[in-house]
């Protein structure tokens, strides 16, 4: 149990009380631009033990994720994510009905894009202050939790989530959307609500 470094560059957190007889929910966490896996892990670390979450957080190879640097193309980052997920699934009992991809800022944009493209794996998407989406395709119908601060100067809400959420809903996705009075951050209350939403029966 506890925090374990990954050879690929990142961390796996296994919650206290984990037992292989009872498969656990898993969240893949993606950091914002200029950050790393520690920042991604911090998004939900305080909620992990109480909710019984396995957390998988990786660092992008560059200053942000390949989809953003490569102008809509996936590359080394998604390959590293695939490898880390394979290792996690082979080493721990994961509930296949409770697998989410989540992220903050650029990581949220990447999470929405990956979630839509891989909805057969990710049943839930947790997007904290996303900027856009650029899925490679559409598979399945993952549910989305989207939050954004009304005073966000980095990714202004009128140009991002207030456009993105109607697009998701128009495409038939179920979305829980939360605006809050604040800047480009993830308030603890928003993180708690996202986890409660994800783990609800």
Image (tube, helix red, strand yellow):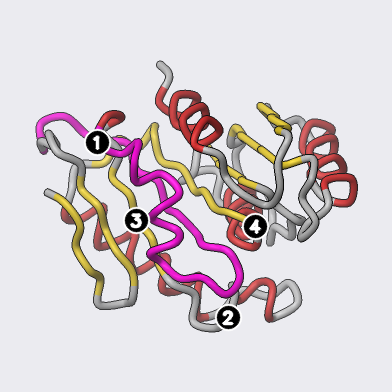
Which circle marks residue 105 in the picture? Answer: 4
For label 2, the residue is 63
For label 3, the residue is 56
Q: Is residue 45 a member of the stretch shown in magenta? A: yes
Q: Are marks 3 and 1 in contact (CB under 8 Å)?
A: no
Relative to 115, is 101 on the left or the right?
A: left
Secondary structure beneath disc 3? Answer: strand
Percent of width and height locating residue 79: 45, 74
The quadrant the C terminus occupies is top left
Relative to 172, is 60 on the left or the right?
A: left
Q: Which residues are magenta?
A: 20-49
For marks 4 and 1, give the CA distance.
Answer: 24 Å
Residue at 44% x, 31% y: name it. Answer: 195
**Circle 4 Cα neighbour tier, 10 Å, few/some/many (<14 / 14–19 / ≥20):** many
Residue at 78% x, 57% y: name it. Answer: 155
Q: Are marks 3 and 4 in contact (CB under 8 Å)?
A: no
Q: Nearer the viewer, mark 3 or mark 2?
A: 2
Q: Is residue 79 a member of the stretch shown in magenta? A: no
Q: Counting residues from the N terminus, which is met first, the one under dot 3 or under dot 2?
A: 3
Percent of width and height locating residue 187: 56, 39
Residue at 51% x, 62% y: name it. Answer: 31
Relative to 72, is 45 on the left or the right?
A: left
């Amino acid at each position: 149990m506890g925090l374990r470094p990954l050879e690929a560059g990142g961390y796996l957190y296994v919650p206290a009380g984990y037992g292989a007889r009872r498969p656990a929910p898993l969240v893949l966490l993606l950091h914002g631009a200029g950050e790393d896996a520690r920042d991604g892990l911090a998004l939900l670390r305080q909620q992990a033990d109480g909710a019984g979450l396995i957390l998988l957080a990786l660092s992008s190879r560059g200053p942000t994720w390949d989809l953003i640097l490569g102008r809509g193309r996936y590359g080394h980052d998604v390959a590293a994510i695939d490898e880390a997920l394979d290792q996690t699934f082979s080493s721990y009992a994961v509930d296949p009905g409770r697998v989410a991809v989540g992220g903050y800022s650029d990581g949220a944009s990447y999470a929405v894009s990956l979630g839509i493209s891989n909805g057969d794996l990710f049943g839930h998407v947790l997007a904290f202050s996303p900027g856009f989406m650029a899925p490679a395709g559409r598979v399945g119908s993952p549910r989305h939790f989207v939050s954004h601060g009304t005073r966000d100067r980095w990714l202004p809400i009128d140009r991002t989530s207030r456009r993105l959420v109607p697009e998701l809903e128009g495409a038939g996705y179920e979305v829980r959307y939360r605006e809050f009075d604040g800047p480009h951050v993830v308030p603890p209350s928003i993180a708690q609500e996202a986890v409660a939403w994800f783990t609800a029966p």
